[in-house]
Structures are given as structure tokens and as C-alpha cells.
Image (cartoon, helix red, strand yellow):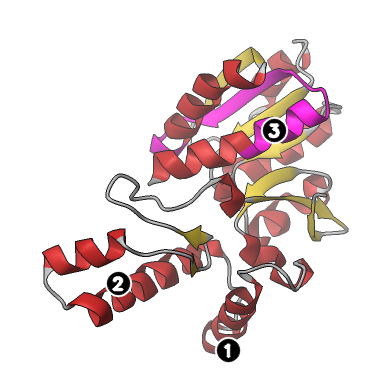
Amino acid sequence: KTAQNDYLAVAKIYEHLVQRKLTRVALLTVSDSFGSSGREQLKALAPRYGITIVADDTYGPKDTDMTPQLTKIRGSKAQALICWGTNPGPAIIARNARQLGLGIPLYMSHGVSSKKFIALAGKSAEGITLPSGRVIVADLLPNSDKQKKSLLAFVKEYQKHFKTEGDHFGGHAWDAMMLLKGAIERGGASRPAIRAQLEKTRNFAGIGGIFNYSATDHSGLTKDAFVLVQVKGGDWVLVK
């Protein structure tokens, strides 16, 4: 599922880059399983979108300064930088890039789509774009959005019980439990019955997207599960 989500998130970023006519890209990915999966998808999908990777570097999960990698990227012909990792590394990269005056658009992965990233990066987060589940911009969605009702209910209940922002990380667990609950109610609690009912699940409006499973698709999502968001004025906005 992680690889599939990375595939969908990368596709969302590359579509936006192509729309902006930005085809020369630098990669900076964390050297753990999440970063490796993202890097694999970034490299695999690049030719499909006419993207040329002009720089490809990594950083360690515990690194506290990525200035050397960013200095090399600044010397390349990259028109945009994609960072793939989870906090705190991407926030450090955002600050380092600002300090260096990198001057090219910075994209992050869905691994930082929470307010924590904005808090860690501070003013350096401004203008950064990334793919995310809709939950962090639930109140900005049009009323026609099929997820909006369930997203707003989730955010309200999460805030009530945990006194913090309801984001898509908590949403993954909510989706898993609701999908399991539905499968058991429809077919019983045996493992074969649960599997069979999950594979029959259609149009489930969860936190992570609209799920449509089948015997050959155990992800259940398309790239429409992601929207592009950007940091403006210290908060998330939808990219039109």
C-alpha cells in the first residue's frame, strides 16, 4: 500500500510540474524505507511525464544539515526540487533551502502533510507544495466533494477526543477500522469472509479517499485520492 500511495502521490506532483512546464527536477530523498519507495517511484515515472532528473541525492533520517546536498542542487540546472521524507528532515531542508536562496519551487511528499511540518519549518514552509489527502483542507472543499461530510465529521471528533488536529495519519487508522467493521457486518468475522467483503467494497468515502476494492486491487484508490496543497500565510490552501 505504501508503494501504491507513493506512486499516486508522485503522479500528482509530476502532473503539476508538467502543467507549469518544469521538466528538469532534482531529488532529495531520505535514506530509509519511505524515502527509498518514493525515490523508486519518482525515477520510474519520470520518463512517462517527460521529466528529466538532473540531480539525485539522499540524506540520513537523523541528519541536521542538508546544506551540502542543496548546494550541489543549486549548481545543477534543476527547475524544481522534490524532497521525499518525514519530519523533521523535510523541515530542515526547507530552512536550509531558504538560507541558501535556492530560488526554485520546492515540493514535499505526503509524509509531511500535517500542521507539524509548518510548525517545524516556520516561515521557510511558505510556498511549498505537496500532495495530501483532503482531510487537512476539508473546510476548503466544495460541497459537491463526496468526502467532505465524512472528513468534517472526522476532524470534529478527532479534535474533541484528542485536542489536536485530525490529519490523514489518524485517518488511515479510522479508514481501516471502518472498512473492517463494514466487511464483518456484511459477511461475518472469518478471515475469508472479511477478505471477500473488502474486495466487494465500492464507493466508501473514507478519510484517505474514495475506496473501490477488487480481487486485483487491494489499494482501492486512484490519484484522485490526493489533492495538491500549498503553504500560504502559515496554513494549507488548495492548489487550483
Q: Could you tell me residue 141's position as x and y percent?
A: 75, 67
Query: Which amino acid lies under the numbered mark 1 shown in the image of this protein?
Result: Lys
- Label 3 sits on a secondary structure element that is helix
Query: Which amino acid lies under the numbered mark 3 shown in the image of this protein?
Result: Glu
Q: Could you tell me residue 41's position as x and y percent?
A: 49, 28
Marks 2/1: CA–CA distance? 24 Å
Query: Which amino acid lies under the numbered mark 2 shown in the image of this protein?
Result: Leu
Q: Are marks 2 and 1 in contact (CB under 8 Å)?
A: no
- Please name the residue shown 74% across and 35% down the image: 16
Q: Nearer the viewer, mark 1 or mark 3?
A: 3
User: Which residue does the numbered mark 2 point to in the structure image?
Assistant: 180
User: Which residue does the numbered mark 3 point to in the structure image?
Assistant: 15
Q: Which residues are magenta?
A: 12-34
- Label 1 sits on a secondary structure element that is helix
**Disc assigned to residue 160:** 1
- Please name the residue shown 83% across and 51% down the image: 123
Task: Tell me: residue 116, above or below residue 36.
Answer: below
